[in-house]
Each structure stands twice: as C-alpha cells, then as structure tokens.
Amino acid sequence: MQSLMKKYLTDEVHGKLKNLKTKSGYTLDMAINSGLENPDSSIGIYAGDEESYELFDDMFSPIIEEYHGFTKDDKHKSSLDVSKLKDATFNDEHILSTRIRVGRNLKNFPLGTNISKSQRDEIESMIVEALKSLSCKGKYYSLESMSEEDRKHLIKEHFLFKEGDRFLKAAGLNRDWPSGRGIYHNEDKTFLVWVNEEDQLRIISMQKGGDIQEVFARLVQYLNELEQKLSFAYSKHLGFIASCPTNLGTAMRASVHVKLPNLAKDMSKFEEICKKHHLQIRGINGEHSKSEEAIFDISNKRRLGVSEVECVQDMVDGVRSLLEAEKFF
C-alpha cells in the first residue's frame, strides 16, 4: 500500500518545500516523518500548526482533495443545530451504544506534533480551568499524577487512553509522555474529555443504546459551554484544524456499536450499504481491529465540507438501512 504522502511527494514538490519553516518551527521533513518511518501508513503526513496547511499547500491540498473530495476553492460549513437532526432515536436491541466525539485544538498554539512541554502544560491548565465552568459535575484525572486506584478505575470504565501508536510516535505526538495529559468525565459517565492525546481536546458524548439525538444534544451543549472559555483553531476553508488531515472540518466521528450477525455473513452487501451512506466499518476495538460476536463500530466517513448535523445524519440514515437489511436478510 502506498501512502498519500508518498503519492504526492514528488522531487519537484520536495525541492520547493524542503527549506520552508512555519513560525512555530515546523518543517516538511517533520511533517512527513511518520510516513517515512511507517511505510504501511495510509496518509503519512501530519501538520504542526495551522500555518502548515498554507505553507506546505502543495503537499496537503492534493491529499485533502483525494481523501475528502474537497478542493482548494471549497469552503467548509458548520452546523450544530440539533433540531435539524431527523429520526435519530432508535429503540433497537441491535444498537448497543452510541458515541459522538469531536477533536479541537486551541487557537494560537502549535499542534501536538510540534508543541513544547511548557506549551502543553499551559494548554492543560487552560482546559482544566474551562472544565470547571461546565454545568455538569465531573472530575479531571491527570495522567502524570494519577493514583493507582484512579488508573484501575479508568481502565475498568474503558476511559483511559494509552500512549499513541507508532504512527503518532513518529509524528512527535508522544513526546514528554504522560506529562500534560489527562481525562475528565462527568458523574453520569456520559461526557468525557481527553486532554493532549492526538488533539489537544477530544470531546466525547456517549451512552448505552441508540438515542443518537440525546447523545448529540449533550455534546453540543457542553461544547458550547467550553467555547465560552476557550478559542479553537478554525479556518473558513478547512474548518476545525487538526494535526491529521483526515480529521479536518467537523473533526467529528459519530458512531454506534451495533450487532449485525446476518449482514456479517454478506460483507459485500454490508459494505455496499455503508458506502452509499458514507460510513466506515470498524471492529469494536477501533481502527484496524476485527469484529467480535458480529458487533461492528459504524461511523461517518465524511468530515470536511459537510456540517456536523450532516455527519450525524449520515450515520443515522446508514444505521437505519443496515438494521432494515439485517431484519429482512
């Protein structure tokens, strides 16, 4: 498999960009290092700051266009209007759980690939302060100072994120681990924030069952509250800025864990339905994992050039089609 970075890194492009450096000190060689160290990478390039997407445009734009179908002249659109979501509540035993997350990075800071330890610690402090203002009650757990009791508790709840994989390590996202990282969750364990994992914030709403409307509404409510305290990096062209170009735009992943034993026997039909609704199929343990007991993680694939409501609606409509196909298999 050839990464998109290798596909578009011609001698001409490398020669043109190799000596350029963003204001935060990020270079092309730093951007492509993960792809060079991991030949099996599908993308192979990370941004170090918002300026990376402009300065290294000759590299990023064709990759973004191929992955998202989004050209240099397109503009992103955003809508978090929950009332526009249609028929998004399922009472179906096949849907085990629902989870919607967005990634966010703070304005005027480098991204995690290129941030200093002091900047990361500053970001953690800013986020922790903002979390205190939320209307829900919750607790922040610092990974660095976490007690063994808290660690076991968070592992049991499947909340604790681990040090990044080899792709993230080569991109510089594991530096100073676990300093400056942490996890917040509310008392009901339905709202979660990861601090300084791949993105500076991973904001997650989740619960058992298939009430997607409720999960989305909760995400929007607390996201709006955080935006009163924090300024997120946003571009009219690319939407919310992320270190990985696949997460640009809404930076949203709306997903359900759904049990589909009949469709699991006909993956071509399964994949055909998902393709029609712009959905991605994963195993229950995330990317690159396999299904267990015919349980699949189904999520939106489109993120850039479509609104948040459209991302969730893609998932809703696709899941409904999958459940109908499962029933009449």
Image: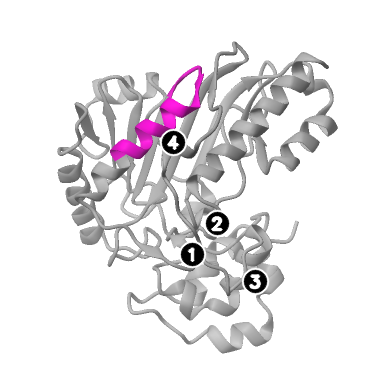
- Which span is picked out in magenta? 207-222
Q: CA distance from mark 1 to mark 3?
A: 13 Å
The residue identified by callout 3 is 62
Up-down relation of residue 108 to residue 211 (above or below): below
Q: Amino acid at mark 2?
A: Leu
120 relative position to 293: left or right: left
The residue identified by callout 2 is 304
Q: Earlier in the sequence, mark 1 or mark 3?
A: 3
Residue nearest the viewer, comparing 80 with 16: 80
**Count of residue discs:** 4
Label 1 packing within 10 angstroms: few (<14), some (14-19), many (20+) = many
Label 2 packing within 10 angstroms: few (<14), some (14-19), many (20+) = many
Identified at 50% across, 63% down, the residue is 46
Name the mark on residue 238: 1
Identified at 40% across, 69% down, the residue is 50
Q: CA distance from mark 1 to mark 2?
A: 7 Å
Return the x and y of residue 14 as percentages of the image width and height.
Answer: 60, 83
Up-down relation of residue 155 to residue 2 (above or below): above
Q: Secondary structure at mark 4?
A: helix
114 relative position to 268: left or right: left
Label 4 packing within 10 angstroms: few (<14), some (14-19), many (20+) = few
Residue 205 position by quadrant: top left
From the image, which quarter does the N terminus lie in?
bottom right
Q: CA distance from mark 4 to mark 1?
A: 25 Å
Q: Secondary structure at mark 2?
A: loop
Label 3 packing within 10 angstroms: few (<14), some (14-19), many (20+) = some
Return the x and y of residue 60 as percentages of the image width and height.
Answer: 57, 71
The residue identified by callout 4 is 83
Q: Secondary structure at mark 3?
A: helix
Q: Secondary structure at mark 1?
A: loop
Residue nearest the viewer, comparing 62 with 225: 225
> Within the magenta stretch, is there residue 329?
no
